[in-house]
Image: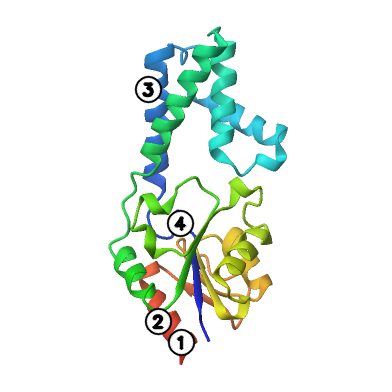
Amino acid sequence: MLKAITFDLDDTLWDNGPVMARTEQVHYDWLDQQAHHAERFPLSEYVARREAMAQRYPLRRGDFTFLRHEALLSILQDHGLPDHDARRLVAETIDYMLTLRHEVTLYDESLPLLETLAENYRLGAITNGNVDVRRVVDATLFDVVINAGEIHAPKPDARAFLAALARMRATAGESLHVGDSWKEDALPALRLGMNVAWIDRRGSGSPIEHPRLHRLAHVRELPYVIEALTQ
């Protein structure tokens, strides 16, 4: 019996590419208007420092808000700002970045689908990103929200999935995971014994065949998977 459904967020319930492109540029431009640092430290340097921070703090490699904070702070300090001013500006910039990050446009089918499913199933969100889905849709739709990077267990780490299942009081066999990444969503969920709805956005085809694996082109096709699982 299907009891619980967990969802990835980015590129599963909305198209995340335009969101991130805008967020990346706009919040960095905003900081430059305050600190006038970007000529010395262009956006590419910010990206490189985030990658370096992920190497420096391996347990925090999935906590993207933390990595952004530390990268920006190091840039402003190297730019010569006093520590107090640098930390204040970084905090303000991160707040602005998170505001931009949450300005997502759900696929037309996503919200009606979630509302319908919430009537019959426990719903959870498992994301490596830093979107709090409760800022995007009605907070009551999701019983559980796991920001995997912030708990130091970014997908494909099994602990993110296990934490969601435990809080939803469901076994892997009673659950379905929905996501667009083969490596971070489909494969780890399959290994745990979950049913999987893999959104193959690029039409690349399933690397393996498995009776618990269902390949979709879009989240709008999810009701057909659920119908098959509940017959």
Percent across and percent down for residue 169 are 58, 73
Q: CA distance from mark 2 to mark 1?
A: 6 Å
Residue depicted at 52% across the width and 19% down the height = 87
187 is higher (above) or lower (below) than 20? below
Query: What type is the residue that disc 4 sits on?
Result: Leu
Tell me which numbered mark, 3 or 4, is placed earlier along the sequence: 4
Q: Are marks 1 and 3 in contact (CB under 8 Å)?
A: no
Camera-nearest residue between 222 and 117: 117
Quick one: label 2, few (<14), some, or many (20+) residues within 10 Å? few
State the residue position of label 3: 30
State the residue position of label 4: 9
Percent across and percent down for residue 56 are 71, 32
Q: Nearer the viewer, mark 2 or mark 4?
A: 4
Tell me which numbered mark, 1 or 3, is placed earlier along the sequence: 3
Q: Are marks 2 and 1 in contact (CB under 8 Å)?
A: yes
Camera-nearest residue between 163 and 201: 163
Q: Which mark, by number, is residue 228?
A: 1
Query: What type is the residue that disc 3 sits on?
Result: Trp
Q: CA distance from mark 4 to mark 1?
A: 23 Å
Residue depicted at 41% across the width and 46% down the height = 17
State the residue position of label 2: 224
Tell me which numbered mark, 4 or 1, is placed earlier along the sequence: 4
- SS class, disc 4: loop
Query: What type is the residue that disc 1 sits on?
Result: Ala
Q: CA distance from mark 1 to mark 3?
A: 49 Å
